Structures are given as structure tokens and as C-alpha cells.
Amino acid sequence: MTFEHYLALFIAMFLVAVIPGPAVFAITSASIARGLKQGVNMTVGLLLADYLFILLAISGLAVVAEVLGSAFVIIKYLCAAYLIWMGISLLRAKPGTSITEPKMQSTQSAVLSGFLLTLSNPKAIVFYVALFPTFVAIENMTYPDILGIMACATLAFGSVNLAYVYLGSQARKLLTTPRRLTLLNRCAGSVLAASGVTVAVR
């Protein structure tokens, strides 16, 4: 792949990343409710799923998606249930307090939730099935090309998602009074639950 190919792919990935979707709402709400670390861990999971999509796209994602169609449906509903559970947890948090991070919200759980979120994201599936092949000559792929594509994904998707995470964590710092924290939990919980419902019905 030439520099022009990488640049075109990066721009396409960046534009796809900027468009808000369930993943953006989920990581932003998680960062607002639980801090920067939670959002960063979820972003790592998002990127790992993007790497998997890249490998599948190169090896024939359409065929894999057809064979594993039911598995993708299961993943979608698992992700939706997880987001709804997170939202309800925030909505049920004690008034005036910020929900503390329970055992299920460990680093591994946050990474896994981000991973499942991308796997169940229709926007990601459409991009890698329909748009990705127009930027990449899949039949002529070399290992350096694959690493270069993953680097593009890291820079494009990672930078945008981390920007949303940072904005969410900064908003959290402004909400220091009990009343504001209660409002924060309710807003973040509602967004997370709504994102879960969106993932389930799409």
C-alpha cells in the first residue's frame, strides 16, 4: 500500500469514528460516571474489536459473517444487556453519590464491554464489509500492510474515542455537589440504557 492509500483509509476511518453512535455514547457516559480509566479501558476493547474486523475483512468477512450470523446476534444482545445493566446501576445509585466501580467493572470487564460493543455495532460491520474493500486491495495484502492498516485504525478510531473519553472525564470534574452528582448518574444511566436498547433493536 502507498502513502496515499493509507491517508485515504485514515480519513475514512476518522470520519466514521467522528459520527456519534452507541459506542461513543457508551464510552462518554462511562467516563462521565466512572472516570477516565473506565473510558480508556473500554476504548482499548473497541480497538481490539477493530483489529479483529480488519483481520476478518482481509480473510473474507462477508463469508465469516454469514457462517457466524447467529453468533453475531448473540453478541449483539449480550452487549445490549450489559449496557442496559450499567445504565440501571447508575440510575439506582444512591442520591448524591457517584456510583463506585464494582467488581464487574474491572479493567478486563471494561475492555470486554468495549470489544463486544464494536462487534455488535452495525456501523462497524457496514464499514468493514462495504467500505473497507474500496480502500484496500485485499488480494495483495502483505504483513506490513496489515500492520499499517491497524496503525491507521489505532490513530483514527483511538484518537477520536479518547477525545470523547477525555471530554466525559472533564465534565465529571465539574459535577462535585451531591445534587449535580445525582443528576450526572441519572443522565449517564439513561444514555447507557438507551444505547443498550439501540444496539438491541438495530
Image: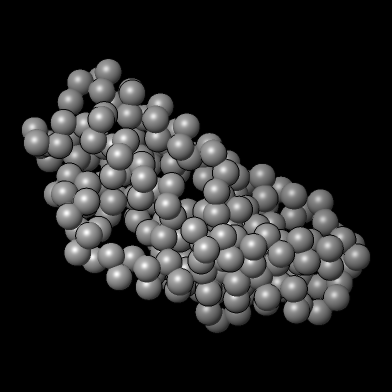
Near-viewer residue (90 or 178): 90
Percent x, y of residue 7:
33, 23
Near-viewer residue (173 or 167): 167
The residue positioned 56% from the left and 60% from the top of the image is 198
Quarter the N terminus occupies: top left
Here the colouring is one colour
Percent x, y of residue 92:
75, 79
Whether 49 is drawn above or below 130: the answer is below
In the picture provided, is 176 more to the left or to the right than 63? right
Whether 32 is drawn above or below 167: the answer is below
- The answer to whether residue 111 is seen in the rendering is no
In the picture provided, is 21 more to the left or to the right than 16? right
Percent x, y of residue 196:
57, 65
The residue positioned 45% from the left and 60% from the top of the image is 117
Percent x, y of residue 131:
32, 36
Near-viewer residue (123 or 180): 123
- The answer to whether residue 43 is seen in the rendering is yes
Q: Residue at the far top: name it.
A: 4
In the picture provided, is 24 more to the left or to the right than 34? left
Whether 56 is drawn above or below 107: the answer is above
Q: Quadrant location of residue 145?
A: top left
The residue positioned 89% from the left and 67% from the top of the image is 178
